[in-house]
Amino acid sequence: MDSNSIGVLMTCPMSPPYLEQELDRRYRLLRFWKFPQKSELLKPHSQEIRAVVGNATIGANAELIDALPKLEIVSSYSVGLDKIDLAKCKERGIKVTYTPDLITDDAADLGIALILAVLRKICGCDLFVRRGLWKNGDFQLTSKFTGKSVGIIGLGRIGTAIAKRAEAFDCPISYYSRSEKADTNYKYYPSVIDLASNCQILVVACSLTPETRHIINREVIDALGPKGVLINIGRGPHVDEAELVSALVEGRLGGAGLDVFENEPEAPEELFGLDNVVLLPHVGSGTIETRTAMADLVLGNLEAHFLNKPLLTPVV
Amino acid sequence: MASIVLYLNNSAKDITFPLLEDRFQFLNPNTSSDSSFSSLAGTVRILLCVANSPVNSETLDKYPSLECVVGSTTGLNHIDLAECRRRGIRVTNAGDAFADDAADYAVGLLIDTLRRISAADRFVRAGSWAVKGQFPLSYKVWGKRVGIAGMGSIGRRISKRLQALGCSIAYNSRKPKANISFPFYASVQELASNVDILVVCLALTNETRHIINRDVMKALGKEGIIVNIGRGSLIDEKEMVKLLVKGEIGGAGLDVFENEPVVPQELYALGNVVLSPHRGGAVPESLLRLQEIMIANIEAFFANKPLLSEIELE
């Protein structure tokens, strides 16, 4: 089988360049972003395209899937599947693979990084020095992390990894998830509001579904309160962003560390002047080591599919 | 009658210790009237040294009855320890009041440096995300080899936290520690050759000044990271800046500098460097613990009991 004749559509540029280079080497790679008019690509090539490689930014929605009659597999360079129309794929018998587990450590490390950056104002400290302000006096005192109570929404792989790290800082851990977990000693709360009322640092680490959209709403933010800190390493739509912004601007919430936003790459400008907020451009799994491992998994899944072997990490 | 404690604050810091003010009578050369001060100066036995107020021969000459200096910081390089030893004066420091906070901060700086947190935050605030697209990839923390220079109460706490983040730990100190099972290296240079990240949390003494020199930093290598929460002069700062600017070491997270508050401007342009204005220990919750420790030291002194956080004077 000459794999170089297999059409693979890559939905957007992805870094590091390794993935694109390998796809180009192995398959007939079509780059969606090079065609300002999508129909320019789809019309002549739609019959060739048997695989789509998407990511957390652009996946495979109904429109795209409909335009590709020969599509057999969507191999996502991501853990999150909210940009893939899974129902449509199931209907068409299109396989879907993703890259679970690889980002667990990076995401959990980032959660801890955000907690420390918000409480200890590390980014604010860095800006203070870079602006030459230290000669005028000391930076303010900041807030302790060790021993603060951490509440985690979603005790899956990432939530558990965050809990283990926070325990090394002597933090008591509590959580909310759809059902209580049998194999853990952490304290369970049956609602997000209960959890928010009983912790100082609330971390969003669950997957985005219709049920978890705006799981952080006005009531939860109020429960967390003026000394509480919200950390979002899930998805932007987990949080009612407008409510969050007004709570932070009005001082009703103590601080926030955000890696994701409702409308990326837009981040709320009202937050840019606040020093109790850390704003990151969705870098959750953005390390060279992890992206390379993710790329290998995407490539491995595609290879397995086209060789009629069992997929490495199918979405069940 | 409350015990008399000499209160020395010649630092630029505006700190107060309300819990101690309640318990003891402070004799303050900056505020006491001349008559009461000169009679008490000759008999006061214990000195509270605020922040980095210098305590040297000149200071000690003024108060000939001093038997104890109670420091309010972890590091004591502003106190002439050799002179104290010569005069039989005992010295206490902040004990572990700031140890957790220093360890937390070291970890925060380390992750920030590797994962480019502050740089990414600046990127968003500058509006670059929408314009320039994805922020460049950074480096994974999990699995990195960390070398800790100085395995005291702060080094131990850093180790515990970094292990939970998947790092392996090795260390250097003057001698191997009995109850530490991490690999020990007899020199900082050997340590640097065998790790990806060097965390500096040593006390600054005559022996440790510039202990992190050019050779050590070259041994750490092009991808190596330095995190310094000890004292600026532990590192040859001029050399470090050169190496960072040339890309001969991978990055640095720095809370302390040789000549605070001066920070080498060449570092401002570097995205792989995190700069911090000596805030590693500064949290209000710990000031409470600091006061508890100082009170305990002072009360033990007056009761002729063992001091809580006496440091060994060599």
Image: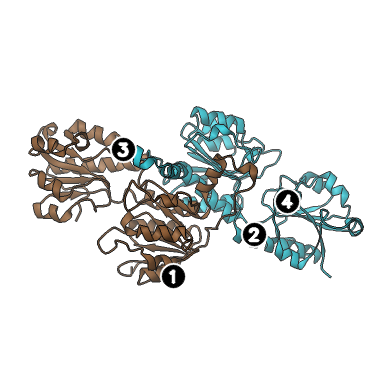
Chain colours: A brown, B cyan
Measure how far apart labels 4 and 2 are at the Cα level: 23 Å
The answer to which quarter of the image holds residue B90 is bottom right
Label 1 neighbour load within 10 Å: few <14, some 14-19, many 20+ = some
Q: Determine whether the residue tagged by mark 3 lies in a helix, strand or loop.
A: loop
Q: Determine whether the residue tagged by mark 4 lies in a helix, strand or loop.
A: loop
Q: Amino acid at mark 3?
A: Ser
Q: Nearer the viewer, residue A292 or A250?
A: A250
- Of the 4 image quadrants, the one containing the C terminus of chain A is bottom left
Query: Mark 2 or mark 4, which is nearer the start of the sequence?
Result: 2
Q: Amino acid at mark 1?
A: Ser
Q: Amino acid at mark 4?
A: Glu
Q: Is residue B2 above or below residue A235?
A: below
- Of the 4 image quadrants, the one containing the N terminus of chain A is top left
Query: Mark 3 or mark 1, which is nearer the start of the sequence?
Result: 3
Are discs 1 and 4 both within one chain? no
Subunit under mark 3? A
Seen in the image, is A101 located left or right of residue B70?
left
Residue assigned mark 2: B287
Residue B142 place in picture, x, y as percent: 41, 47
Measure how far apart labels 3 and 2 are at the Cα level: 45 Å
Seen in the image, is B36 located left or right of residue A23?
right
- Check residue B312 in the rendering and tell me which mark sits there, or answer none: 4
Residue assigned mark 1: A197
Measure how far apart labels 1 and 3 are at the Cα level: 40 Å
Are discs 1 and 2 both within one chain? no
Q: Amino acid at mark 2?
A: Leu
